[in-house]
Amino acid sequence: MAELSYAQVSALLKYDPETGKLFWRQRPEAPQSWNTRYAGKEAFTASIDGYRVGRIFKRPYKAHRVAWLLHYGAWPDDHVSAVNGDRADNRASNLRDVSPLESSRNLGIRSDNKSGVTGVSRCSRTEKWVVTISVKGVETYVGRYDTIDQAAHARKEANSKYGFSPTHGARPARPRAPKRSASA
């Protein structure tokens, strides 16, 4: 199935590049009940693995890819990556079209990480902190360190040396809960 065109998607959705939100447009051909229920309301609010997702003509789309289309007028060439690492932040200033390799250099910390620092693990035999980094699929040894702080610093330097994003290995930003309004 061919991708939808810019004209098709822009007729259905409006994108706010400052907030990164998508909104359903009024549809003249749609039943009044659809327009009453959806027109002007935020679209793509469901979340899978931190990404906002939704459906257009029963086909699933990720909001960051649709945002890219509506902002730049064409589908992205490759992966769309969030500069700040927050997958739900679809502001135009936070999105970039990158290769899969570049996208992997902006990943957050894995959920099974025990040290709290990407690429750092504790060697039970030597009781030292071991630092490694994967570059183009090859695991590269960085060194062994007495303290977690030394190891974290070495990994940060390795990230810089090998072109990883400053946010690589960071914990994803947690969205703040909306403030509750005082009841009257």
Image: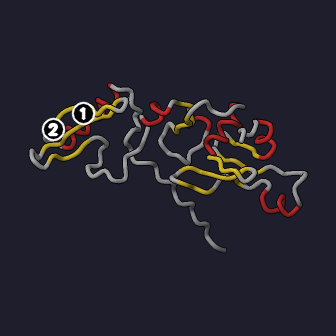
Q: Residues within 10 Å of mark 1 (few under 14, many from 20)?
A: many
Q: Earlier in the sequence, mark 1 or mark 2?
A: 2
Residue 130 position in % (x across, y down): 19, 40
Image position of 148 (left or right of 88): left
Q: Quadrant of residue 129?
A: top left
Q: Give the residue at x 79% y 46%.
A: 12
Q: Residues within 10 Å of mark 2 (few under 14, many from 20)?
A: some
Q: Give the residue at x 69% y 52%.
A: 55
Amino acid type at mark 1: Ala
Q: Are marks 1 and 2 in contact (CB under 8 Å)?
A: yes
Image position of 39 (left or right of 126): right
Amino acid type at mark 2: Tyr
Q: Give the residue at x 61% y 57%.
A: 46
Residue 100 or residue 164, whichever sits in front: 100
Disc assigned to residue 60: none
Residue 25 or residue 19, whichever sits in front: 25
Q: Residue furthest left?
A: 126
Relative to residue 57, is residue 101 depicted above or below?
above
- Residue that badge 1 annotates: 154
Relative to residue 46, is residue 22 depicted above or below?
above
Q: Quadrant of residue 80?
A: top right
Q: How is the image coloured?
A: secondary structure
Label 2 sits on a secondary structure element that is: strand
- Residue that badge 2 annotates: 145
Q: Which image quarter holds the C terminus?
A: bottom right
Residue 104 position in % (x across, y down): 44, 36
Residue 30 position in % (x across, y down): 87, 55
Q: Quadrant of residue 163?
A: top left
